[in-house]
Image: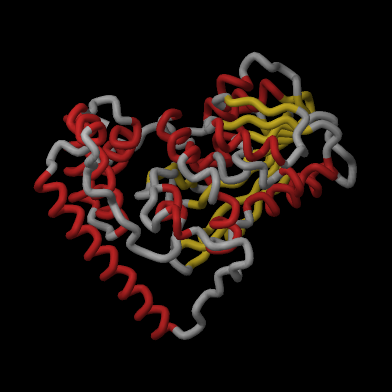
Amino acid sequence: MNRRERRRQQSGGQAAAPASAAAAPASVSAMLMGLAGQAAAPAAAAAPLVIQADPIQALLARGKQQRELADELARQQRALALQPDSELLLRSVARLQLRLERRADALITYRQLLRLAPDHPEAGHMAAILAGTTPEQADAAYVARLFDAFADNFDRTLTHWLDYRAPQLVAAAAAQALGGGKAQAALDLGCGTGLLGPEIRPHVLRLDGIDLAPRMVEKAAARKLYDHLEVAEIVAYLRPRTGRYDLLLAADVLAYFGKLDEVFAAAHAALLAGGLLVATVEQHAGTGFIGGKSGRFAHSESYLRQQAEAAGFAVSSLQQAALRQEDGKPVPGLVFALRRS
């Protein structure tokens, strides 16, 4: 918040607040970046998302949503013309432009925001991706703020609207790799609200968890399934803990890493001989990795295998799977188990 916005709030007024442009998020980017409105999270009794079978109806619904988003963008741009130094409005306008696939416009808006706030974590990360200079990983402050802001509605929105399956997929792959046994000490990397906890707890004797977002860790603690929880960055946490774990789990976490060399090396060091790293990535059909409009990364299978081998892992299993729904379509991903050689 800049000085003018603080003065406006202190005097009883405020900047034109971005409004919700849709009743429910259609994607992770819509959810986490506030493009569907946090207040629109479904109630506990809401029915899971049903993919529209009629393609004509689906197309009409998509068109209606796009028109609503475009109307909301126009409203916010009018407000921004009156308050051109509003960081709140610049960020919201850029997010809506991304949702509408106006990437060049979003880049201009994020750069405007960076001129006002050079250290703005989201603007710096997204401007780099949109300019084609993909960063090696998402900024830690950006990720922490993103998830903290949605901690209260995270579980319900993911499971009811986006058919989120990463925790179940990771737990199943881990159980298979363990061969019916139990891990002595497991660590949930980027545990979030602890959605993986109920799935993996029957397969481990001790379960720790770490996450960048303090409010997400609070939600995980409330499940009472973890033996230890801590707010920490993954690589920094793993590096000094040589040979501490025999199972590392990362459900929908590596999407915030572009390059995988450091996190794989740190995981290898933290595992006992024969230990396992079980995780998911969003799949990229080309080579290497790419950054998307959500600020997340997708990886190719060839890149994943290359980085695993370079870090000293053997691929125990690797399967394609739909990780969740995005705009009514399954998101292709890879679920894999790597064993420390």
Percent across and percent down for residue 206 are 82, 31
Q: From the viewer's perspective, tell me whether residue 38 is left or right of residue 51.
A: left
Image quadrant in which you'd find residue 57? bottom left
Most extreme residue toward the right is: 181
Residue found at the very far front of the displayed protein: 12
Residue 285 visible? The answer is: no
- Residue shown at 62% from the left, 44% from the top: 251
Which residue is painted at 44% across and 40% down in the image?
A: 146
Which residue is nearer to you in this view: 62 or 317?
A: 62
Q: Can residue 241 be seen in this view?
A: yes
Name above or below for residue 324 compared with residue 341. Answer: below
Q: Where 16 falls versus 231 (above or below)?
A: below
Q: Residue at x 24, y 30 (%)?
A: 6
- In the image, residue 39 sits, relative to residue 256, either above or below, namely below
- Where is residue 331? Give x, y as percent: 51, 59
Which one is in front, 282 or 108? 108
